[in-house]
């Protein structure tokens, strides 16, 4: 009778609710617990008293579109037509939903690389498309042989996420080359590149699809100001796509949201003028290192973390429980909330790995590591 009988409450909402109920340190849902830049707060105050309270143009405030184009040009050297190739969205989630609705027809297959972020499947199902979930390899990087095996003339889209949530891994040059070859080999195959953590990378520079002209004509890139400026609650992001694809995406956007809330667009346009996103990597790298060094004496084994604000850890030496039960124990008995990694995969093999979010005050991280060292 209803269209989506099997969609549960997201693991992020579930764990944050459990965390609040148990008064736990919340390292589950990914969001910063520290204050937003006071410069941005001042800009909002100043902006609120101006004439900024009516609809912006459908694709976004022109000034914000321009500033976004500048950010992309400064970061990757890619020059975009800000009126035709960029769309301001209500967060990356809406960008992803809207793009999938615009592209996917009944019976189209969409490749998703597991473990994968939780907002890809539902819009595919809603469009009567078929999510084809392919495991990443043991290193959480793409298994190109398996991807090629699963690509057919029914495959319309491949969704990638780099830097990767939940693993914190980032793609190599060779992965980008394999992806270009795949797109070249299949005329009707498109690419949705979820790059919300594009500015949060550590030792390696981020290999954005923006850097590869061979990808541009078939790639939709999605990003989020929520991650870049510590404002996840604002829900403002953007989509980059070639004009012909963007025109289709705009048809959905026009009737889904029409245009994103005006005050945040005005404030972000102003704020972007003075921001250096290159500082974000080193900022989070310090937090990553503080968290990792605090766990040195623990019984957790830390997996590599090259980007995002997530750290994976194996609890194999600690408990025989599955990861979901382990996280329930962690929050109820030890007052610390984390995310079980198996929920990000369709085929649940026993993996004793949990995800911690380190976008937190140093004090929160130190408290968390003390708790984790006692387990
Ligand atoms: N993609 C990934 C990989 C994410 O981790 C998130 C989490 N916020 C999103 C998309 C959604 O971003 P937004 O909050 O801007 O909708
Ligand atoms: N992206 C966030 C995470 O991975 C969650 C956002 C949400 O709750 N939808 O934790």
Image (cartoon, rainbow, N blue to C red):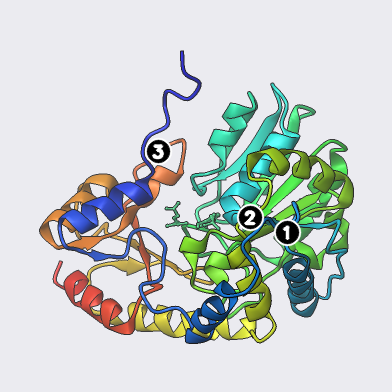
- Snapshot quadrant of residue 297: bottom left
Q: Secondary structure at mark 3?
A: loop
Along the line of sight, which residue is nearer the eye, 248 or 319? 248
Percent position of residue 70, x then y: 78, 76
Among all residues in the image, which is located at the extreme top? 1
Q: Which residue is mark 2?
A: 260
**For marks 3 and 2 on the same chain, the one whose residue lies earlier in the sequence:** 2
The mark lying in front, picked from 3 and 2, is 2
Give the Cα separation between the discs numbered 3 and 2: 37 Å
Q: Residue at x 63, y 61 (%)?
A: 262
Percent position of residue 46, x then y: 56, 80
The reply to whether callout 1 and callout 2 are in contact (CB within 8 Å) is yes
**Viewed as shown, does residue 41 lie left or right of 265?**
left
Percent position of residue 356, x then y: 35, 64
**In the rendered image, is residue 143 in sight?**
no
Q: Which residue is mark 1?
A: 60
Along the line of sight, which residue is nearer the eye, 114 or 88? 88
Which quadrant, please, contains the C terminus? Answer: bottom left
Q: Residue at x 38, y 66 (%)?
A: 357
The reply to whether callout 1 and callout 3 are in contact (CB within 8 Å) is no
Structural crowding at the residue carrying mark 2, measured as other residues with C-alpha within 10 Å and reported as few (<14), some (14–19) or many (≥20): many
The mark lying in front, picked from 1 and 3, is 1
Percent position of residue 340, x then y: 33, 51
Give the Cα separation between the discs numbered 1 and 3: 40 Å
The image's mark for residue 348 is 3
**Viewed as shown, does residue 184 lie left or right of 284?**
right
């Amino acid at each position: 009778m209803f269209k989506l009988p099997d969609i549960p409450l997201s693991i992020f909402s579930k764990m944050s609710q459990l965390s609040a109920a148990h008064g736990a340190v919340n390292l589950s849902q990914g969001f910063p617990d520290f204050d937003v830049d006071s410069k941005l707060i001042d800009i909002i105050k100043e902006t609120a008293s101006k004439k900024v309270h009516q609809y912006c143009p459908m694709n976004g405030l022109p000034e914000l579109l321009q500033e976004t184009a500048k950010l992309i040009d400064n970061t990757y050297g890619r020059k975009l037509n800000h009126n035709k190739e960029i769309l301001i969205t209500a967060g990356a989630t809406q960008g992803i939903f809207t793009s999938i609705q615009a592209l996917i027809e009944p019976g189209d297959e969409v490749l998703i690389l597991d473990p994968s972020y939780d907002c890809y499947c539902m819009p595919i199902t809603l469009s009567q498309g078929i999510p084809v979930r392919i495991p990443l390899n043991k290193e959480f990087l793409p298994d190109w042989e398996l991807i090629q095996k699963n690509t057919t003339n029914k495959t319309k889209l491949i969704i990638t996420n780099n830097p990767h949530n939940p693993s914190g891994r980032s793609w190599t040059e060779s992965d980008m080359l394999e992806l270009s070859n795949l797109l070249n080999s299949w005329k009707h195959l498109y690419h949705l590149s979820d790059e919300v953590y594009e500015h949060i990378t550590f030792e390696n520079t981020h290999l954005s699809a923006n850097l590869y002209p061979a990808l541009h004509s078939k790639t939709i890139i999605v990003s989020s100001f929520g991650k870049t400026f510590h404002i996840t609650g604002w829900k403002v992001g953007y989509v980059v796509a070639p004009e012909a694809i963007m025109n289709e995406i705009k048809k959905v956007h026009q009737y889904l949201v029409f245009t994103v809330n005006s005050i945040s667009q005005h404030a972000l346009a102003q704020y972007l003028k003075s921001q250096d996103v290159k500082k974000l990597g080193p900022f989070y790298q310090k937090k990553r290192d503080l968290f990792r060094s605090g766990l040195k004496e623990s019984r957790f084994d830390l997996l590599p973390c090259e980007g995002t604000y997530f750290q994976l850890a194996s609890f194999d030496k600690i408990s025989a429980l599955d990861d979901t039960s382990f996280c329930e124990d962690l929050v109820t008995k030890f007052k610390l909330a984390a995310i079980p990694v198996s929920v990000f995969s369709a085929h649940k093999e026993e993996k004793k790995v949990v995800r911690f979010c380190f976008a937190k005050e140093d004090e929160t991280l130190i408290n968390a590591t003390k708790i984790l060292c006692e387990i």
